[in-house]
Image (cartoon, helix red, strand yellow):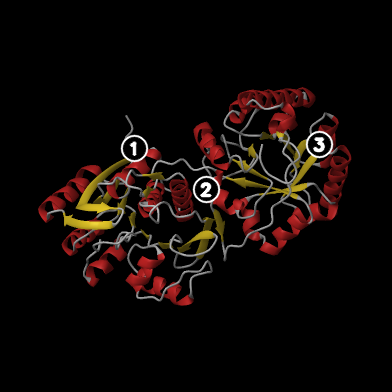
Amino acid sequence: MTASPTLLSIAGHDPSGGAGIGTDLAVWQAMGLHGSSVCTALTVQDAQGVRELQPTPLPVLRGALAVARRELQPAAIKLGMLGGAQVAAEVAAFCELVDAPVVWDTVLGASAGGVALLQAEPRTLRRLVRASTVITPNRVEAAQLLGLPPWEDEGAPPQAWVRALREQWLQGGRTRAVVLKGGHARGARSVDWLCTPQALLALSVPRLPDGPGGRVHGTGCVYASALAGMLAQGADLEQAAVEAQWRTHAAIAQAWVAPGGRAMAHAAAQPDSGDFPALHTGVPTEPGVFAPLLRPPGLYPVVPDADWVLRLLELGVDTVQLRAKDLAGAELRAQVRAAADAARARGAQLFINDHWREALDAGAWGVHLGQEDLMELGAAQIDSIRVAGLRLGVSTHNPAELARAHALRPSYLALGPVWPTTVKATPHAPLGLARLRALAARCKPLYPLVGIGGISLERAAAALDCGLDGFAVVSAIVSAEDPAAAVRRGQAIALAARQWRQRLAGTDPAASAIAPGGHGA
C-alpha cells in the first residue's frame, strides 16, 4: 500500500466547528489528502467572539510535536491560532527543525472580537516568519504585525507595504511568498496579492456579501490549509494561491448558518465556475469578453496546412485548427488567408494557432494561444484580437493557467494533456480522466471545453464523458489511412456524446448550440 502525504495542522480547537483544526482537516479531506493535528489551545467562542482561551500545557504540546516530527514526517504544515507566548515559541522551534513547507495563517484575533489569539515575543515572531514558507495575513493582521497604515482599496499595495513585506518578511529564512488576502478590503472584487521577492501578482474573485452576524467564520483557515495542501503535492506558489482562493470563495458562497445565527465557511465546498479566480500580472481590470462559439466544437482536428483545412471542410468538419509550425513569411500569410477564406465561405469555426497577427490580417474566425504566447503578448495586443471580433481559445494545464486564461474571458478553454503525447513536448504530466473531470466541473457552465493531448478516436468518448464539448486530434486524422472514414467516426463519437448529455439534461437538441452573446454548452 502506497502511503499518501500527511499534512499537519498546528492550531486551536474551535468548539463551533467553524474554524481551527476541524476546518483544516475537513479541507484536506475534501482535497483527498490525509491530515493530522496538534492542538495549541482550547477555546470558548461563539458569534460574539472568543471568550476564553486555555493554551495546551507545554509538556503535552512538546510531546505531540515530537511524535509528529518522528512518526508523521508531514509533507506540509499549516499554522493557525497559537495562543500563548510559550506555545508560539515551542511551535517556532518545531518548524525550524522540519524540512517541509510551512504555511502560517497569522491569526491575531477573531473577526467578532474577544481575547487575543497570538501572544508572542518579537524574537518569536521573527522566528515564525523565517521558518514559514508562505505567510497568509489579511490586511488588518499585516498592518498590525508590520506597523503599517491601513490600506483598504482594490488597487495595488502601496509601495510602503511592498517594501515592508520584502524587507521584514522576504529577506532570509525560508519565506518565499506572502499572500495579502483581500477579504477585509472594499470594492466589487476581492483581490489577494501574491508578493514574492521578485514579483507581485493579483488574484481576484467577485466579492461576496457578509453572512448573518458579519463576516463568514473560518475563511482564513480554509485558505491557508488549501494552500498547504497544494504545496504538499508539489504545486508551485501560483497554483497553490489560485487553488486556495478558489476553494475559499466556494466556502463562502456555500457557507452554512449555525443554529445560533453565525455563518460558517463550508470547508468541504467543491468549487465551480462561479468561484473562478482571475490571475493578473498587474492591477485587476474588468476585461471585455471574447465572442462566443457558434456551436460546440465536437471533433476538432488540428492540421499543418491550408490544404488539410480545405480537405476537412469538404468532409463536413465545422471546427478546425491550423497549426502551421513549419511555415513563415509570405507562405505563412498565404496559407492563413486561404484557410480563413475557405472557412468563412462555409461558416466553419477556424482557429489559427499562435500566428495572431496573420489571423488578424486575414480576418480569420479565431486564434488559439498557449500559455507561453499569452505571457509574451501585452494587454493591448490581446485587446486588439478581441476588438477585431476574433474568438480566442487558450491551452491550460492547471489551476493557475486556468486563472490566467479566465482573466481574459476567452471563447473556450482547452484542458490537457489528457494522455501522453508525442506530437508536442510538454513539461506537464498528463491529467488523466479523474483530474480532467475535476477541472472540467470547475469550468462549467461558464466555458466550453476542449480536451487536448494524446486523444485518439478510441479514447475520445471517455474524454468527452468528463464534461468536454470537443476533443482535439492530430494524428488520428492526418495520419489515418482513410481520413474521410476517421472524420466520420470522430463526428459520430461527438454526436453520440452530445445526444447523451442532452438526454441526461432533458434538453432539446436544438439547444446544444452556444448562443451568441454568452458562454456555455
Query: Which amino acid, mark 2?
Result: Asp
Residue labelled with disc 2: 275
In this rendering, position of residue 452 left or right of residue 55: right
Viewer-side residue, 433 vs 476: 433
Instruction: Give the spatial CA distance, label 1 vs label 2.
Output: 28 Å
Q: Is residue 189 above or below residue 346?
A: below
Q: Is residue 270 above or below residue 203?
A: above
Q: Is residue 90 in view?
A: yes
Quarter holding the C terminus?
A: top right
Q: Residues within 10 Å of mark 2 (few under 14, many from 20)?
A: many
In this rendering, position of residue 332 left or right of residue 112: right
Residue labelled with disc 1: 4
Q: Residues within 10 Å of mark 1 (few under 14, many from 20)?
A: few
Does label 1 or label 2 sit earlier along the sequence?
Answer: 1
Q: Residue at x 67, y 27 (%)?
A: 507
Q: Residue at x 79, y 46 (%)?
A: 365
* Circle number at residue 506: none
**Disc nearest the viewer among 1 and 3:** 1
In this rendering, position of residue 15 left or right of residue 334: left
Q: Is residue 427 in view?
A: no
Query: Which amino acid, mark 1?
Result: Ser
Residue labelled with disc 3: 308
**Disc nearest the viewer among 3 and 2:** 2
Instruction: Give the spatial CA distance, label 3 vs label 2.
Output: 40 Å
Q: Residue at x 16, y 52 (%)?
A: 61
Viewer-side residue, 476 vs 69: 69
Viewer-side residue, 120 vs 234: 120
